[in-house]
Amino acid sequence: MGANFRSDNVTGVDPAILQAIADANQGPANAYGGDDCTKGLAAKFADVFETEVTVLPVALGTAANALCLSAVTPPWGAIYAHEKAHVIMDECNAPELYSGGARLIGLPGQHGKFSVDTLATTLKQALRGVHHAKPSAVSLTQLTESGTAYSVDEVKAIGALCRKEGLALHMDGSRLGNAIAGLNCTPAEITWKAGVDLLSFGATKNGAMAAEAIVLFRKDAGLAEALEYRRKRAGHLFSKMRFLSVQLEAYLAGGRWLKNARHANGEAQRLSQGLAAVPGVELLSPVQGNEIFVRMPVPLVEAIEAEGYLLQPWENPEGSRQVIRLVTAFNTDPKAVDGLLAAAAKRRAA
């Protein structure tokens, strides 16, 4: 039957969210966030995260990340993240641009995560004074670029170190729903209760058309105001903000975001377990969300794609083997997973 497993960005929009956009299109509404939906978002997010928050909708994850980090990092500051984190590898230096020149420092670690010990050692060795970048912020990614999740205890340990060192802790939650569904924790436990100050809350990859949110947990009126000005100055204060806000409202309603994530995660588990049973296929990282990274023979990749299944090459081929990323989504058809596994088994039989 064929299907596209290259990314969760290739999907359409959750019908409930699409309906919310259509409903918001009936009649006028105040502009630039003055509509009732946008004004009510903070209360909706407060219910989900069990604490008062400041919420600023934006359309892109890159904007959310760069604005968050720029608000807590001066131009002479240093931001620490995993060496393969999205903020370092895939945002075209947006955090550096928005912060006015802050330096991003990559930390090593297996499966897309750095440890609290690695961060502590790096901070201990950091040169201090006006000749050097000032340690200012730390950014964690949920899910990581390897499809893994920082556990609650791991985030708590990093959060405690950040408080001790006076650093802000940011979380890039582009796939936060998938991480929470996999960890079986609450949104509060993995964020502010663990020491997270600012969150880039993702929705686009999990059913929205184009909607993310900056969520500020730290009770800091000055920081909240700075984020408002930074969003406007960066060109992300939408005049028809209601069309972003209604997506977020529908996404949260009734726990839809976690329901969508659980479906994606479940299909990823089925797909990864089936592929791991195929001779010559090597699973490269634990599957803790909806992303799968495998190394497989190039002929197997070609055979699967010949059946109409689109796969994402992740690294250059190493001889006769290729690293592939596969991503399931909120609306992945179980039959598509069955079909891909059947195509792999067909090649094995041949």
Image: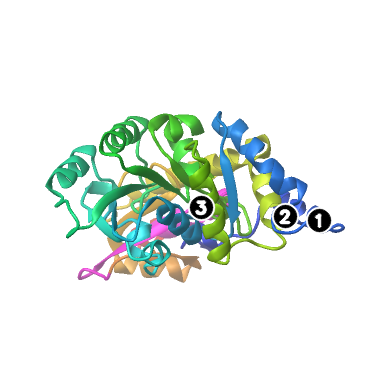
On the image, the x and y values in percent for residue 211 come to 60, 55
Q: Residue at x 55, y 30 (%)?
A: 51
Please state which amino acid type lies under the numbered disc 1: Ala
Q: Tell me, yes or no, whether the two marked residues, 1 and 3, touch with CB atoms within 8 Å.
A: no
What is the quadrant of residue 327 in the picture? bottom left
Considering only order in the chain, which callout, 3 or 2, is on the residue closer to the N terminus? 3
Residue 104 lies within the magenta run: no
Please state which amino acid type lies under the numbered disc 2: Arg
Residue 230 seen in the current view: yes
Please state which amino acid type lies under the numbered disc 3: Ala
Q: Tell me, yes or no, whether the two marked residues, 2 and 3, touch with CB atoms within 8 Å.
A: no
Report whether 150 appears left or right of 210. Answer: left
Most foreground residue, 235 or 85: 235
Most foreground residue, 140 or 231: 231
On residue 242, which mark appears?
2
Residue position for label 1: 29
Residue 324 lies within the magenta run: yes
**C-alpha span from label 1 to label 2:** 8 Å
Considering only order in the chain, which callout, 3 or 1, is on the residue closer to the N terminus? 1
Residue range of the region highlighted in magenta in the rendering: 316-344
Residue 99 higher or lower than 270, as above or below: below
On residue 226, which mark appears?
3
Most foreground residue, 347 or 284: 284
On the image, the x and y values in percent for residue 326 come to 42, 57
Q: Tell me, yes or no, whether the two marked residues, 1 and 2, touch with CB atoms within 8 Å.
A: yes
